[in-house]
Amino acid sequence: MRRVDYFDSDQIEGKAYDARLIKRLLHYVRPHRRLVFLAMLFMTVSTAVELLIPYITKEGIDRYLAKLYQVYTTDEAVADSLARSDPDRDRFVPLEPGRMMVRKASLDEMDPARRARLKELGTLARETYYLFPEEEADDRTGRVEGEYWLVPEAELSEVPPATIVRIRHPDMEGVTTLALLMGALILISLGAGYGHVLTLQIAGQRSMYDLRMRLFEHIQELSLSFFDRNPIGRLVTRAANDIEALNEMFTAVLVNVFKDVFLLAGTVVILLALDTRLALIAMIVVPVFAVVSMVFRIKVRGVYREVRRLLAKLNARMAEDLNGVKIVQIFRQEPRRRRDYEDTNIEHFQANMKRLIIFGIFRPMIEVIASVGIALVLVYGGLGVLEGSLTLGVLVAFISYVRQMFRPISDISQKYNIMQRAMSSAERIFKIVDTEVEVRPPERPTTPPEIRGRVEFGSVCFSYVPEKPVLKNVSFTVEPGKSVALVGPTGAGKTSIINLLCRFYDVDKGEIRLDGVDLRDHDIQTIRDNMAIVLQDAFIFSRTVEGNIKLGKTIPRERMVEAARMVQADTFIRKLPHGYDEVMAERGATLSTGQKQLICFARALAHDPRVLILDEATSNVDPATEQLIQKAIETLMRGRTSIVVAHRLSTIQRADQILVIDNGRIMERGNHQELLSKRGIYYNLYLLQYKEA
């Protein structure tokens, strides 16, 4: 038989893009859309600057640093025509009739048809030269033609540096201007990038705050049956780790993916505009890149899913062991629980290692593929520079753009997995948000002017699991101000009656009435405002003693202190370092079990309920303290409808009515003396507890 894993429900496949989930997530983003639009504006500016900087580098190299010319020989008429088209003598420089210098960068930027026509009309020498004034000529290198000194590109080092600085002063000014422009653009990019990250993070955090609050509020509204099926650790994982996965998707993907697409599209367009043939050569590796990315996505998908499942399992084990640490220690279960936790931790470690191995292979492969693309550009572009069909500036810009082209492709591939992980998290979160509240408030609640506290159970049947009834045709009535006690063996259904009366669950059959109105027609808030319950497991929150008694309700301090005094809690509370302002440790760890129980008594009394429920409330109080608070309980019960669940028969002897429950049915009913006289189940229970007396 296959072992059922408690965390199988965490195995959600998750798509990389689910329009339905994205639409639901955008519902939480919509209130912060102005920040998102501002982030996209910043992103557009920073992306435009990234696209512009390599082009400025290219212009600086071709226009000022590598200002190279080639000798062009043609008919005198063609040479005159070219000279007239360039009055500034920057692109076409006449040397003598029918012979001129043509700027190499101008040829590269020229329309291909016109460049081909020029080559048909004349001869273009392959050698490249720097062009200086005739008066600066030096016998060590170059030659003089017309009014200019032609220095071969390879022999520029023969020219004295001082001469170069003097001759090329205008070029140096141009480089300085471009450098200042580039610096300004970098500052703009820095500011835009900062604004992009800041606004996006603020929008993401606010959106996740709203979603986290919605999830927490919904979890609080869910019926207790939901918590019967879901471990606390899993819910903590949903509210913490899964929300964070969505935040990562929002800040790293939803807006940044537009930047990647924009950057990729802009880079491809610029590459094609600079040199179509070289651009196509650079893109030869793109199909290989796509195949590697596809394999990576498939491999990492299952690993991410397994990591999330095991993380939830780790959290659940941790929460369970910490909540039951006393039991673990008293029964010396530390080694076994440690082994169980270690087994899960090893599985989580192995899953994470597998993920790291996949990333460790993928990222270097991406770098290798990108390097191959750059190598192809260097080889073919370098040949183009040597042949004179490509300028050095274009080659340098090409290398920068090719690097820039592979970066968004790599980012998009990795963001695919962030998206998929986030979609899985979103599906889990919305699975909880979509969980219907089984105990639903009425559409039109009946609101009586005042709750008197008359409780009626009419033929109530109830089961936690279908076909396994816990209560079977339970019927009884408690008049306002009267008390009823529920006794019987463990598992008889006593606590289930309490759960139904508080409307933590709804009945399967029959009805429960409060002041003659079906409990399902009352507003749930009204029901619980008029009820107070003291459970066997006293729960203390991590707040002050006063906060634990008031629980956020506006109760005068004098009334709160009086309630504590009536249940004998005031004495030990005042001995605390800060008295009623003492902050309790988690679950009241610094208090004894009896002290926690007394605080819960004070809590119930301070809220002045119409219906009081005591579920084994004195089970953790020592006999001496029990005698002290018995009178306080009687005072507390006076004038209130009281339902008491107890195993100690001494605490219920004065109840107006005692119900003996066994196997989900009321077997006996009556007061203490009546039940003793029947010599039935109650009589036997009484003998068991008082046989020595």
Image (cartoon, helix red, strand yellow):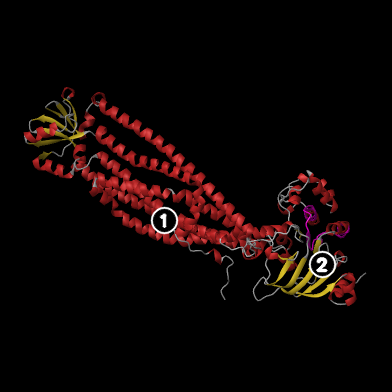
- Considering every residue shown, the one lying at the far top of the view is 135
Q: Within the magenta stretch, is there residue 285?
A: no
Query: Looking at the rendered structure, which numbered label has been put on residue 361?
Result: 1
- Residue closest to the eye, 162 or 626: 626
Q: What residue type is labelled 2?
A: Ala
As displayed, is residue 331 above or below residue 374?
Answer: below
Q: Locate residue 64, reporting x and y percent.
A: 26, 32
- Neighbour tally class for label 1: few under 14, some 14-19, many 20 plus, Cα within 10 Å: few
Q: Within the magenta stretch, is there residue 625?
A: yes
Camera-side mark, 2 or 1: 2
**CA separation in Å, label 2 and label 1:** 69 Å
Tell me which segment is drawn in magenta.
600-627
Q: Locate residue 131, reporting x and y percent.
A: 18, 30
Q: Locate residue 83, reporting x and y percent.
A: 13, 32
- Considering every residue shown, the one lying at the far front of the view is 449
Q: Pick whichever of labels 2 and 1 is earlier in the sequence.
A: 1
Query: Looking at the rendered structure, which numbered label has been put on residue 52?
Result: none
As displayed, is residue 675 above or below residue 636?
Answer: below
Q: Mark 2 points at which residue?
A: 485
Q: Which amino acid does label 1 sit on?
A: Ile
- Residue closest to the eye, 58 or 676: 676
In-image side of 580 versus 111 (left or right): right
Q: What residue appears at the point 57 percent right and 52 percent down from the top-left corner?
A: 212
Q: Is residue 619 visible?
A: no
